[in-house]
Amino acid sequence: MKNVFLFLISFMAFSFAGVNELVQEGTEFHDKGKYDYAIAKYKEAEKLDPKSALVKYELGYSYYAKGDVKQALQFAKEAERLNQDPRLVESIASMVGTIYDAMKMPDSSLEAYKAGFTKAPHSYNIPFNAGVTCMGAKRDVEAAEWFVKATRNTKLHPSTYYYLTFVSENLGNWTDVFSYGMYSLLLTQKKDQMQNMLRILYQNSKGLVTVRAKDTITMNLPKKSKKADLHDAFILAYALANMDSLGNRKFYEKDTTSEQIAEYLAHMFKDAVELIAGFDESHYSNVLTPFYKGLVKENLVDAFVYTIVENADRSVYAKWRLIHANDSKRFYDWIHAEFLKVKK
């Protein structure tokens, strides 16, 4: 009897090792785009352990990458049913939701995300993916709610803040447009996203006033938000700031060079930071409010602003940094130690 028991233990250990090795080989094939070879390896692993949620997940992932959504969904649902590993909850829920989204079934997709988020409440990927699904279905209010849930779980995921800017614009939540938009410029390393966000914030700023004739300036306020107390107040104050000037230059004039655009954005972003930081946190649940309040408190507004306008015109940033190198270092030290709570 003892020998039989030892044999079973040895066989199980061998099978487990074999499954892991096959999954690793399958993953390597998948990463090279050889999905049929990957699936073949996973099928071998499935024979050794037919109740492995990981194997089912990897099968679903490779079938999805291959474009076979029906097979992908079948294995993803099996993985969901079999899974007992909390580390796999996020990945499985995200895959099930993504597959349903690809099948143009947003309600089923969101059900999968909701179920997954209940089990993995600290995930940011699940609410982010749910927000993307809602955006595709043109359900902006729900998209905003999901993206905000993601922001509460991460301060470092650029796409969450990037997409939340667009949703906020659709909803007319102008405080959020500038709050999330400026912050996304700090996070993203993608040149196209940086340029796109700068263009959006620039156009929204410049569009607030119109020069009808010489010395005649007209406010051109955008559509109202449902949160009129905050967002309309912000956009009105921001429009008034747009009528300001620096020396002989009027900021509502048409900008023609990248240097002038960067100069204009730096001027307007400073006003945006001051306005956002001035809101009472009890009435404004934006997760970034402490960030903007901290910038003002630590006298780091300029350091932040010139850092994010660098991609509009590097020379404007370089001139500032030449004089304020210490402030630039102090800004990065503060954001890591105080806002992100990252230890060096």
Image (cartoon, rainbow, N blue to C red):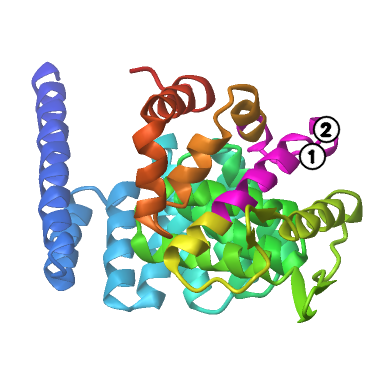
Q: Position of residue 188 (x, y in %)?
A: 41, 51
Which residue is drawn at the image coordinates 9% and 36% (left, top)? 14
> Tags 2 and 1 in contact by the CB under 8 Å rule?
yes
Residue at 35% from the left image edge and 48% from the top image edge: 53
Q: Is residue 74 visible?
A: no
Q: Secondary structure at mark 1?
A: loop
Is 37 left or right of 76, judged from the image as shown? left
Query: 146 and 84: which one is in front?
Result: 146
Residue 280: x percent and y percent? 83, 32
Q: Position of residue 278 (x, y in %)?
A: 78, 35
The answer to whether residue 289 is visible is yes
Horizontal side, residue 232 vs residue 160: left or right = right
- The part of the image, by quadrant, that contains residue 128 is bottom right
Image quadrant in which the C terminus is located: top left
**In terms of secondary structure, what is the magenta stretch mainly?**
helix
Q: Which residues are magenta?
A: 265-291
* Residue nearer the viewer, 156 or 70: 156
User: Disc 2 vs disc 1: which is toward the camera?
Assistant: 2
Q: Is residue 217 placed above or below 250 in the rendered structure?
A: below
Amino acid identity at mark 2:
Asp
The residue singled out by tag 1 in the image is 284
Q: In the rendered image, which quarter contains the N terminus? A: top left
The answer to whether 254 appears left or right of 61 in the picture is: right
Question: Residue at 35% of width from left, 54% of height from top?
Answer: 314
In the image, residue 281 lies in the stretch drawn in magenta? yes
Q: Which residue is mark 2?
A: 280
Q: Quadrant of residue 311?
A: bottom left
Task: Residue at the far bottom: name it.
Answer: 213
Q: Is residue 238 magenta?
A: no
